[in-house]
Image: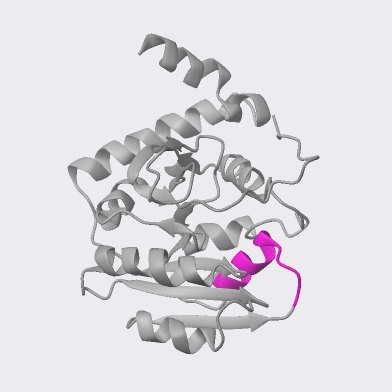
Amino acid sequence: MLKRLAWFVFKSPQRRMVGWKTLFTDLRGLAEAALNFLSPGKPQALVICTGNFNRSRHLLEILIPSLLRADAGRGWIALSVADCGSTDIPELEQEIRRHWPGTLYFSHMEEAFARARVFNRAVRQTKEPLVMLCDADMEVPDDLQRHIGRYVNAHLAWFPVCRTMLAPAPSTDWKYLSAGTGICVMRRSHFVALGGLNEAYTQWGHEDWDFFFRCYRTGIMPLRNRVYGLVHHYHPSLKPDDFKPMF
């Protein structure tokens, strides 16, 4: 425990990449999370924003069923899909509507997939007060509302650590994806103030960490915790051979 605390205080990425002022941001964010735990606020409407390029089966068979379980008929979750020239399922919007009975925002564009651009589009076409950036190959936990009530606040956004499946089903091998920060939930006002994801990132990776560190630079703590029910389902890696980690 002391070793983990020392790493958090002295060696966590935000200290190295942004500076020591992030320690104050973290302490304030943790205090807000503690208050939320004791006295959670009223649930707010949430929109799940995802980009899609030929991951339509994942969207229909994994993400949407998990959203239905998390929503449990309460109607507090909306879905926004920005499709980027998918060809795997014809009439994709109609197929999504067959699976998703709630509020749906859908757009289609014929251009190369870039995660920052399509996720920004997915957010812009919505209006709910809370936004969640979530890839189409994700499964969300049934108690999603409880997590959001604890970890999203005035100076707090939620960047959960998911489980990632290491091989196709029926394999059950997995690990926590500590290097990924692409899944997040925050107030819409925070997303707008941050300017969304940086669309200068047109290749694979780094737009998520860039956004993570920009949260710190504006005084928002992007809280990280492991969530067993948040699952990234297997697909072949898209990481290019020349990819270099940010740190």
- In this rendering, would 241 be left or right of 6? right
Q: Residue at x 50, y 34 (%)?
A: 178
Q: Quadrant of residue 199?
A: bottom right
Q: Is residue 82 visible?
A: yes
Along the viewing direction, whichever of 40 and 164 lies nearer the viewer: 164
Q: Position of residue 4 (x, y in %)?
A: 43, 16
Along the viewing direction, whichever of 139 and 214 lies nearer the viewer: 139
Which residue occupies the extreme front position in the image? Answer: 170
Q: Main secondary structure of the magenta part?
A: helix
Which residue occupies the extreme right position in the image? Answer: 242
Q: Position of residue 23 (x, y in %)?
A: 51, 26
Q: Residue at x 21, y 73 (%)?
A: 74
How has the structure been colored for display?
Answer: one colour
Tell me the magenta residue range: 111-122
Q: Quadrant of residue 36?
A: top left
- In this rendering, would 67 be left or right of 86? left
Q: Is residue 124 visible?
A: no
Q: Residue at x 69, y 29 (%)?
A: 247
Along the viewing direction, whichever of 245 and 168 lies nearer the viewer: 168
Which residue occupies the extreme top position in the image? Answer: 2
Q: Position of residue 159 (x, y in %)?
A: 46, 45
Quadrant where the N terminus sits is top left
Which residue occupies the extreme left position in the image? Answer: 38
Q: How many marks?
A: 0
Residue 114 is a magenta residue:
yes
Residue 38 is a magenta residue:
no
